[in-house]
Image (cartoon, rainbow, N blue to C red):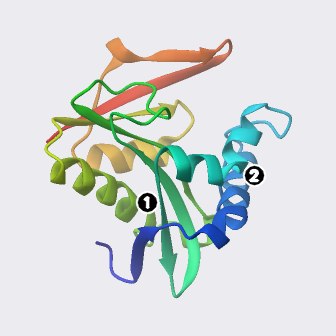
C-alpha cells in the first residue's frame, strides 16, 4: 500500500460524496461530457456499492479516490470472464495525484482478486487516460487490443489484463 493512503470499503454515509468525487474527476478531467448519460452512473455510488465492492482511498483522513472492484458475479463486470475480476470507475482527485492513491486502489483490487484465486484482473480505459495507462503498465498490466470495445457509439475503450 502507498504510504499515507488508506484503502477501505465505502461507508453508506459516504455514497453522495463518492458519487460527487467520481463525477468531478471524470467531468472536470475532460473524460466525459457533463451532458453524458454516463454521469448519472458515475454519480450513483449506492448502486456500485450494492453490485460491486466499492472501495475508497483516504489521504490524511479525507476521501481522495474511489474504485469499483467487480468480482465475476458483479453486474458491473463488463469485460471479465468467469475466472477474472475487473475494476471500473477509478477516480483520483487532482489535488492528490502523484501521491500513490491510484496505485493503492488498483493494488487493493488486485489483492482481492488474488485472494479469491482468480486468474486475471481486467479493465477498460479511454484512450485519453494516459496517466492511468502508465500506472497500469508499471503495475504489470498489458494491453489486450483484441478485447477493445465500444459501449456506445463514439466511445472507444482500450483494455488491459494482469495475470495473477
Work out which residue is located at the far right of the displayed protein and give it. 35
Q: Position of residue 7 (x, y in %)?
A: 40, 71
User: Taking 123 as reference, is 110 above or below it?
Assistant: below
Q: Position of residue 127 (x, y in %)?
A: 53, 30
**Circle nearer the N terminus (1, 2):** 2
Tell me which residue sits at (54%, 64%) in the image.
Answer: 65
User: Gap between marks 1 and 2, in whole Å?
Assistant: 17 Å
Q: Position of residue 78 (x, y in %)?
A: 46, 26
Quadrant of residue 86 in the image? Answer: top left
Tell me which residue sits at (57%, 47%) in the image.
Answer: 48
User: Taking 34 as reference, is 9 above or below it?
Assistant: below
Q: Position of residue 148 (x, y in %)?
A: 42, 17
Relative to residue 110, is residue 148 drawn left or right?
right
User: Taking 150 as reference, is 67 above or below it?
Assistant: below
Q: Which element is circle 2 on?
A: helix
Tell me which residue sits at (64%, 53%) in the image.
Answer: 45
Tell me which residue sits at (59%, 18%) in the image.
Answer: 151
The mark found on residue 102 in the picture is: 1
Asked if labels 2 and 1 touch by Cβ distance under 8 angstroms, the answer is no
The residue wearing badge 2 is: 28
Looking at the rendered image, the quarter that the C terminus falls into is: top left
Amino acid at each position: 500500500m502507498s504510504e499515507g493512503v488508506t484503502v477501505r470499503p465505502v461507508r453508506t454515509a459516504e455514497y453522495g460524496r463518492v458519487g460527487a468525487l467520481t463525477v468531478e474527476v471524470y467531468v472536470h478531467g475532460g473524460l466525459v461530457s457533463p451532458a453524458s448519460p454516463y454521469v448519472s452512473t458515475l454519480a450513483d455510488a449506492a448502486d456500485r456499492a450494492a453490485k460491486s465492492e466499492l472501495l475508497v482511498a483516504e489521504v490524511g483522513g479525507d476521501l481522495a479516490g474511489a474504485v469499483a472492484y467487480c468480482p465475476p458475479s458483479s453486474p458491473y463486470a463488463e469485460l471479465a470472464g468467469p475466472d477474472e475480476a475487473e475494476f471500473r470507475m477509478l477516480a483520483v482527485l487532482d489535488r492528490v495525484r502523484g501521491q500513490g492513491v491510484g496505485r493503492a486502489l488498483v493494488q487493493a483490487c488486485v489483492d482481492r482478486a488474488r485472494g479469491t484465486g482468480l486468474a486475471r484482473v481486467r479493465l477498460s480505459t479511454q484512450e485519453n487516460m494516459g496517466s492511468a495507462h502508465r500506472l497500469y503498465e508499471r503495475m504489470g498490466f498489458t494491453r489486450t487490443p483484441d478485447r477493445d470495445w465500444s459501449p456506445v457509439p463514439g466511445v472507444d475503450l482500450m483494455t488491459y489484463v494482469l495475470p495473477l
